[in-house]
Image: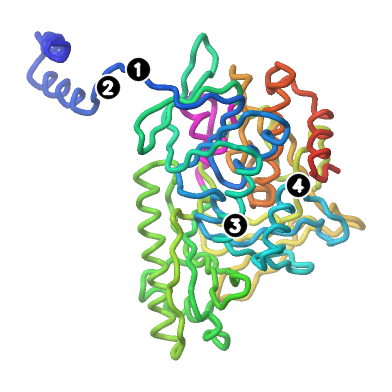
Amino acid sequence: MRRRRFCQVAALGTMGLTSADQAQAKAARQQVVIETRREIPVIDEADICILGGSCTGVFAAIRAARLGANVVLVEKQNCLGGVATSAMVNVWHSLYDTEFKRQIIAGLTLEAIERLQKRGAAESFDKSASKGCGFNSEELKIELDEMVSEAKVRVYFHTLFSAPVIEDGELSAVIVENKSGRAAIRAKVFVDATGDADLCHRLKLPTYVRKNLQPPTACARFGAWSSLESVDVNKILAEHRDEFALPEGFIWGNRVPDSDVYMLAGTRVYDVDCSDAKELTHAEIEGRRQIRAIMDILRKYAPPNDISLQALPSQIGIRETRHVRCRYQLTGDDVLTGRRFDDAIANGSYRVDIHHQDKPGITLRYLDGREQYSRPGYSNEEGRWREKTDSNPTFYQIPFRCLAPEGSYGNLVVAGRMLDADEVAFSGVRVMVNMNQTGEAAGTAAWMALDQRVSIGQLHPTELRELLAKGGSLIV
């Protein structure tokens, strides 16, 4: 009866219109469907709800839970870890400053590394600007399971965030979808660690997407990689990429500890915004196609070798999509000059690493003023982004204000790559060892806001830094 009444009203709405106008109105109706209003069951209630189970979200959850909060963690995949596991990027960068004299990162990143090392599933690289630690992504999945279980965090796998719930002007719950259907999770404080700022975006908070997003990369794991030891892989791929429609990008990789399996990051998908469903789908298919192209090139032009494709990622490695407008935007000048902040919650020493949208290769900028453009198959182009100085910064910082969204929801904080940063700053801070720290900060801040009954914006930065340090972070 209700459906019939709606159709009658819709039909009356076209009376008096020309046939062309009626056709346009009909087309407009066909572009939407009306979802019947229904009651949504509440499946869980928590102090803090965290959306996104990358290491950023996991570390937010563990920090908050260890402080005494009742925490729920929602993850769309079947495991925790995000890029480090589902996307198979098995490298974390250095925990030390650029001179490798001072440790600047500890906390849960260090704890996870030490736990993996006890199992022979992680190895350290001494004084490397490119790699700090390599690990077995599959072992990390299990280790993260154990860490959240120990902290008594309740995890929902295969669960997608769908919509926020606003009651009396306050963010009070989130709607999720999983195998059990559509449901709600209530909480007092929320952490958006979705990577794409899904919660903030659907709350209609200010967000932005850069014109030149850093393109995503699909990684792959190959067996018997050592059979290519005498082969210049970069050179062969550069010489024959056109034959297999393999776009120019950048190639790097890392061996899985205690194995002859190699993780290769050699693809690049241009002109996609992976916060859009259609473009994300295209990126996944194109990334896998490029992996096969790499295999075919190496089989044809680098024989004999015994390499075999061992694993594909369950999600493409996304570098950048949406950013949230927060109380402060980190700038390239802040990073490259090593600016100190009184609300600093993370330290980093990884160089600025710009994966270009408009040309192949990457541009690296170092804190000592050096600049390098690196393109596989070509000689590096060396230069400087500033003149030499007598002294140079050895690390940079991320202020908490970059995680505090603009807007009216005081019980919401963000963590991870959607933080507010310009293109140059983001190119340095986006790596996992840095984003892991933003998760720890967000979880700690969420607990403080809950405990003190204040909004995220009212937290005192000194107290936040002290609590992070007490929990094992190196806040300098």
Q: Quadrant of residue 66?
A: top right
Provide the secondary structure element on which disc 3 rests: helix
Please give the count of numbered marks on the rendered protein: 4
Q: Are marks 3 and 1 in contact (CB under 8 Å)?
A: no
Q: Position of residue 89 (x, y in %)?
A: 56, 60
Measure how far apart labels 3 and 2 are at the Cα level: 41 Å
Q: Specify the amino acid type for callout 4.
A: Gly
**In the image, 204: left or right of 431?**
left
Rendered image: mark on residue 140? 3
Q: Which one is earlier in the sequence, the residue at label 1 or at label 4?
A: 1
Q: Which mark is residue 39?
A: 1
Q: Is residue 6 left or right of residue 407?
A: left
Q: Secondary structure at mark 1?
A: loop
Q: Closer to the N terminus: mark 3 or mark 4?
A: 4
Residue 209 in sight from this viewpoint:
no
Residue 277 vs 8, above or below: the answer is below
Residue, disc 2: 35
2 or 4: tag closer to the N-terminus: 2
Residue ID at (54%, 50%): 82
- Between marks 1 and 2 in the image, the one whose residue lies nearer the viewer: 1
